[in-house]
Image (spheres, rainbow, N blue to C red):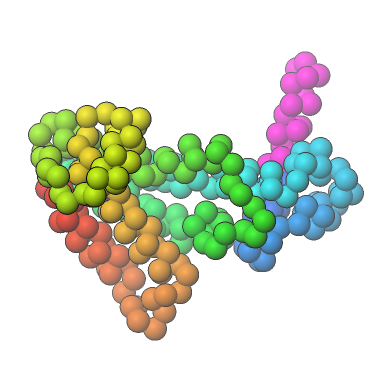
Amino acid sequence: MPAASIRARARAEMINEIKTIARRHLAAEGANLSLRAVARDMGMVSSAIYRYFPSRDELLTALIVDGYHALGDAAAAGDAGVTDRADLRGRWLAVCHAVRRWALAHPAEYALLFGSPVPGYAAPRETTVAAARTPATLIGILVDGFAVGALADPGPDGLPGPVHADLAAVRDGLFAGLPEALLARGATGWIHCFGAVSFELFGQLDGVIGAREEYFDHQMRRMCDLIGLP
C-alpha cells in the first residue's frame, strides 16, 4: 500500500477515534466540549489534536454533520422498509417511528442537533445539506403520492403571501411540481414529529404520559389525517 494511503487511513482512524471520545463527552457533559479534555482522554498532548480539529467549533460541526447523516440514514431505512410503496401513510409512520427510535438510542446526539444552542457556536452552511435529509425523506413521500394522483392539491389552504413565496422557493429547489399547500402540510407534519420526539426526550412527558410509543403513534396518525395521507 502506498505511503500516502497508509497516512490517509491512519488520519481517518484518528479522526474517528476523536469523534468517538467527543460523543462520550457529549453524553456526560452535554455540548460543553473541550478539545483539551478529549486529548487528555486519548492520551495525547493537547497540541496534537489541533492537527485534526483546529478548534472546538470544527469538532462540533463534524459531530453535527455525522448526527444529521445518521438520523437521515435511519429515516431513509424506515421508509425503505415499507415494501408497499403506495402505502403513503405506512411510509410516513415508519419514518416518524424511525426518527423516534434513533433519538431514544442517541439522546446526546439528538440534543446536540435539536436541543439548546451551544453558546458561542454558529453552525456553518455545510450542516444544512445533512440536516435536510430527514425532512426530505418525509416530503418525498408526498411527492410520490402527488405524482400518482393519490394526493390532491389542497388549493390555497390559507397560506399567507410571504409564506407562499417561501414555500414556492423551497419547492422549486427541492420538490419540483409539489403544490406549496401540500408542502406546507408536510412541513407541519415534520415539525410535529420532531416536536413530539423532543417533548419525550427532554422530559416534558415525565409524569404525564406513560405509554410513550402508543401516544407518539397516535399523534403521528393524527398528523397523517391532517396532511391527507390515505
Q: Is residue 41 above or below residue 73?
A: below
Q: Quadrant of the N terminus?
A: top right
Q: Is residue 225 left or right of residue 51?
A: left
| Residue for point 40% across, 69% down | 199
Which quadrant of the view contains residue 47? top right
Would you say residue 214 is visible in this rendering? yes
Where residue 197 sits: x, y (%)? 39, 62
Q: Nearer the viewer, residue 1 or 78?
A: 78
Where residue 184 sits: x, y (%)? 25, 47
Which quadrant of the view contains residue 132? top left
| Residue for point 47% across, 70% down | 202
Q: Nearer the viewer, residue 127 or 170?
A: 170
Which quadrant of the view contains residue 162? top left
Q: Nearer the viewer, residue 183 or 31?
A: 183
Q: Is residue 86 above or below residue 40?
A: above
| Residue for point 34% across, 36% down | 170
Which residue of the protein is positioned furthest toward the front in this rendering? 161
* Residue 40 drawn in magenta: no
| Range covered by the magenta-colored residues | 1-17
Where residue 169 sits: x, y (%)? 33, 34
Would you say residue 25 is visible in this rendering? no
| Residue for point 70% across, 34% down | 12
Where residue 43 sits: x, y (%)? 85, 52
* Residue 10 drawn in magenta: yes
Q: Nearer the viewer, residue 64 or 25?
A: 64
Q: Main secondary structure of the magenta part?
A: helix
Q: Is residue 213 left or right of residue 40?
A: left
Q: Is residue 11 left or right of residue 184?
A: right
